[in-house]
Image (cartoon, grey):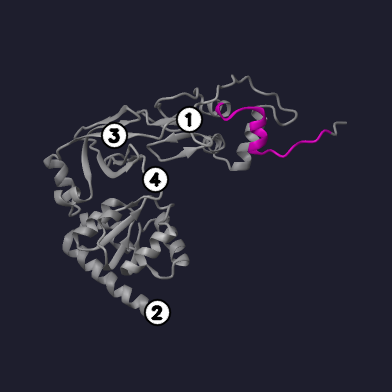
Amino acid sequence: MDFSFQPEITKELLLEHHNEETYMAFYLGIPVKKGLFISPLRVDHKPTCSFYKGRRLYFKDFATGECLSFENVVMKKYGCNYHEALEIIAKDFGIIKGHTPKSVPIQPIFKKEKKTTIQIEAKSFTNEELKWWEQFGINKSVLTKYRVYSCKTVFLNGNITSVYSPSCPSYGYYFGKDEDRELWKIYYPFRRTFRFIGNIKTTTIQGYNQLPKKSKLLVITKSLKDCMVLYNLGIAAIAPQSETQFIEENVLEDLRKRFKHIVLLFDNDQTGIEFTNKIKRKYKWITPMIIPLKYNAKDISDFYKAYGRDKTIELIKEGIIYLKQWEKHS
């Protein structure tokens, strides 16, 4: 009878047997090395992925924004939860008693990479590009104010990742520098998926540098494009980096002093509504607003494109009436 103790499966236990590089290479099916490569986890035709070594080793997909440890890679690959992923790894590598380890070449330690670099070769906006932006009420002067550029070529870690074509233009949102590194968010509006790549910080607030010192109304929306639409209508607006990363507490408190009313206007899809409810519970002084589903427009950019300037202004006026009613009952 076997009375041997079976240890609890943890990340630390796995790393006592093999390094992160070995697990990562095994489940991605590619060696861990420098440079860009096509994602092995999705249909991909352009090299937009790389490995990154900070405190841990990560598989970074610049097209989706995902940054995955080896456990996360297994979760994504097999559609399982964290503990199931640890168990799969332990079985595959014979760490669980009774399972034969698979033949796996041991990977060398991956050296720390420098931070991700993005650079662009800018070009003049074509008439077609300006016409596309103008359907949202965004003209060239607004694009200039918000530091939006038309890209001829986009470089990711020194490698060309995209080149301009009329069927797939790209636009660079510039957010200044971090030491000697330019900070960009690249927008591909005609792609069905993976429409953004970027190297900006998760705490970056889009539109923040364009805010007035004080005003009656501030709208927190979900994209820089929405910010520009609202700016053109005379409304100050900002957007967090993503719907999962909200604005830091100290910044919110500063904004609360500068603006009389702060409104949250996110998408009216499930993700947007769930996030709105979360923020509403945490910050009672932020007024939640959603574009009514009857308009079939998920955000203010879509609404402007579908209904034009006058109808968008009318919608905002309705929102202001709602805001006053909200104040009376809150």
Q: N-terminal of the two: label 3 or label 4?
A: 3
The span from disc 2 to disc 4 (Cα, nearest Å) is 38 Å
The picture places residue 91, in percent across and down from the top left corner, at: 67, 30
Within the image, what quadrant is residue 129 found in? top left
Q: Which residue is mark 4?
A: 201
Which tag is nearer the camera, tag 1 or tag 2?
A: 1
What amino acid is labelled 3 in the image?
Gln
Circle 1 — which element? loop
The residue drawn where x is 14% and y is 38% is 124
Q: Which residue is mark 3?
A: 119
Q: Quadrant of the C terminus?
A: bottom left
Q: N-terminal of the two: label 1 or label 2?
A: 1
Q: N-terminal of the two: label 2 or label 3?
A: 3
The span from disc 1 to disc 3 (Cα, nearest Å) is 21 Å
Q: N-terminal of the two: label 1 or label 3?
A: 1
Asked if residue 288 can be seen in this view, the reply is no
23 to 237, vertically: above or below = above
The span from disc 2 to disc 3 (Cα, nearest Å) is 50 Å
Residue at the far right: name it. Answer: 1
Count of marks, rendered view:
4
Q: Which residue is mark 2?
A: 329
Which tag is nearer the camera, tag 1 or tag 3?
A: 1
Q: Which mark is residue 112?
A: 1
What amino acid is labelled 2 in the image?
His
Task: Specify few, some or many for label 4: CA neighbours under 10 Å numbering under 14, 14-19, or 20 or more.
Answer: few
The span from disc 3 to disc 4 (Cα, nearest Å) is 16 Å
The picture places residue 114, in percent across and down from the top left corner, at: 42, 32
The span from disc 1 to disc 4 (Cα, nearest Å) is 19 Å
